[in-house]
Image (cartoon, coloured by chain):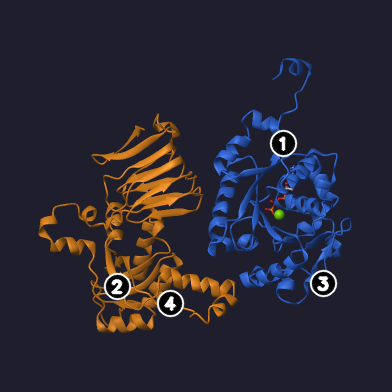
Chain colours: A orange, B blue
Amino acid sequence: MIVWNTSVRLWVQLQTAIHVTCYHSADYQRISRLRTNTKTTGERLTQHEGIGAVELKGAVFTLPVLKLHCTDLDAIEHELKVHLARGLSFFKHAPLVIDLELIKEQQGEELDLPSLVSTMHDMKLFIVGVRNANPQQAERAVTAGLAVLKGGVTQQEGAAEKPANAELPVATTNIPFSGHTKIIYQPVRSGQQIYAKNCDLIVLSSVNVGAEVIADGNIHIYGSLRGRALAGVSENTKARIFAQVMEPELAAIAGNYQVFDEPNASRLYGKAAQIYLDDNQLVIAPL
Amino acid sequence: MSRVIVVTSGKGGVGKTTTSASFAAGLANRGHRTVVIDFDIGLRNLDLLMGCERRVVYDFVNVINEEATLKQALIRDKNDNNLHILPASQTRDKDAFTEEKVGNVINELRDSFDYIVCDSPAGIEKGALMALFYADEALIVTNPEISSVRDSDRILGMLSAKSQRAIEGEEPIKEHLVVTRYSPARAETGEMLSLDDIQELLGIDLVGVIPESKAVLQASNSGVPVIRDEQSKSGQAYQDMVSRFLGEDIPMRFLDAEKKGFLKRIFGA
Ligand SMILES: Nc1ncnc2c1ncn2[C@@H]1O[C@H](COP(=O)(O)OP(=O)(O)OP(=O)(O)O)[C@@H](O)[C@H]1O
Ligand SMILES: [Mg+2]
């Protein structure tokens, strides 16, 4: 009973983001780094005491929003697990905002926020705040240690405001493409995951079996692709995957995926090749 | 500057403890003050392989819990004054490990030793993560089979993400590949992965190839690291490995299957 219905829709929704301007919030990574420092090297913080142990900075983040359709935690958990199993895993450890717009609570059926937080935490999904909360919900969110976010325009909503764009595929036009490219110099190893957000991904080494590389843009691998590669995950149907040695476990473009459990399925398997989308069909072509 | 070296693999039973014992004994034999720590809480293997199980009074967990000093817990090797063992405990108290407490012990060891060898348990759970956390270098022990190589790949990923060096953004852990239980004959017939395959899959430098040999089991049954068995191929291969680790450039040995029979000797190769 959450908003993600099909796997393709899933990607759209994941990328449907709100922009939160944090006036007084320190950089998330900086904080977590400070935390690890206190844990591992106790002196580090004291060393900096004279300079100031923390630093406040403003930053703009794009956060994924999870819109709930009901308050039934079991149903939510079940559905999330299905999605995680389908390859939503890059989403793990990401900060997440819960949208309460559709939650009309009856007496005695209030959404149990602390349980939701811990259930999702167990799935490695970290709720950082809520949006569209009514005053009672906002109060309970604060008690549960969550931020109450005001405003924020999701990409779909943004598109709806511009009728001229309404017929275009939603996501492609609205992805803030950074123009940067994420470059990975080391092998991507089993169990590792790389996500190039809003940009292309270049791997100057191999992507090993059990590893996963994901990009909103194209993926270039100047070694062997033996793991999973998902390009154009924000509905970018023009994205492509290039590899010097194309031996993927799975390749996907804009949510259209193919599993290569039969190495001989393509004569290009093991060769230099590219994968692109032609009329919703994945095509493998030589380089 | 002392160096912390983790001996790890992901997969179980591939030869980590065998390698830890021989590696530590080899370093000590060349004059380096060396300690080898057993991180495999609950199992206690290393002390058996090193033939000092009867002399274990205090263990690593006692030291961590400050029930004993390091001095009390360290066992000196019978044959080599440069070699010390910090044994694991049989009390299955894995929760004793915290980064901070393990770090304190390692720091204290750094004062008196050149090399601190950490024998990791199998898996990618807490014990294995603790063993690798403070590593400066890693010996990745791999058998020539797909499942072992894949687990090694996984653990290499952990080294580059979960170690202190990774978290603090320092120079990455130096990784060395050790292929153990290598059987040239079976590699030749394609029954096992070849060295080239393994290196291609893992992409790290090879520091040693240890052939499959009965001498390993015999040595561990008699509580002597196999590196001290100078007659055995695996002992010699471990000697070579230590030399390469210390920077010597020596060719790999014992890679080719023994040619059997008269005709093969004439017409072979
Ligand atoms: N080169 C070798 N030739 C033959 N047998 C070997 C060799 N290396 C290790 N073995 C055997 O393999 C078994 C496992 O070795 P060892 O205990 O060193 O592995 P391990 O990786 O430490 O295992 P664990 O994951 O349980 O800690 C032992 O019986 C050992 O004698
Ligand atoms: Mg062992």
Give the left or right position of residue A64, taking residue B175 as reference.
left
Q: Amino acid at mark 1?
A: Pro
Vertical relation: B218 (above or below) A173: above
Separation of residues labelled 4 and 3 (CA atoms): 45 Å
Q: Position of residue A4 (x, y in %)?
A: 29, 59
Amino acid type indicated by mark 2: Thr
The residues bearing labels 2 and 1 have C-alpha atoms spaced at a distance of 60 Å
- Check the residue under mark 1 and report the chain it is in: B
Residue receiving disc 2? A21
Q: Residues within 10 Å of mark 4 (few under 14, many from 20)?
A: few
Q: Which residue is mark 1?
A: B251
Q: Quadrant of residue B143?
A: top right
User: Do the numbered discs 2 and 1 sit on residues whose CB atoms are within 8 Å?
Assistant: no
* Rendered-image quadrant of the C terminus of chain A: top left
Q: Amino acid at mark 3?
A: Gln
The disc labelled 4 sits on which kind of residue?
Glu
Q: Residue at x 80, y 59 (%)?
A: B33
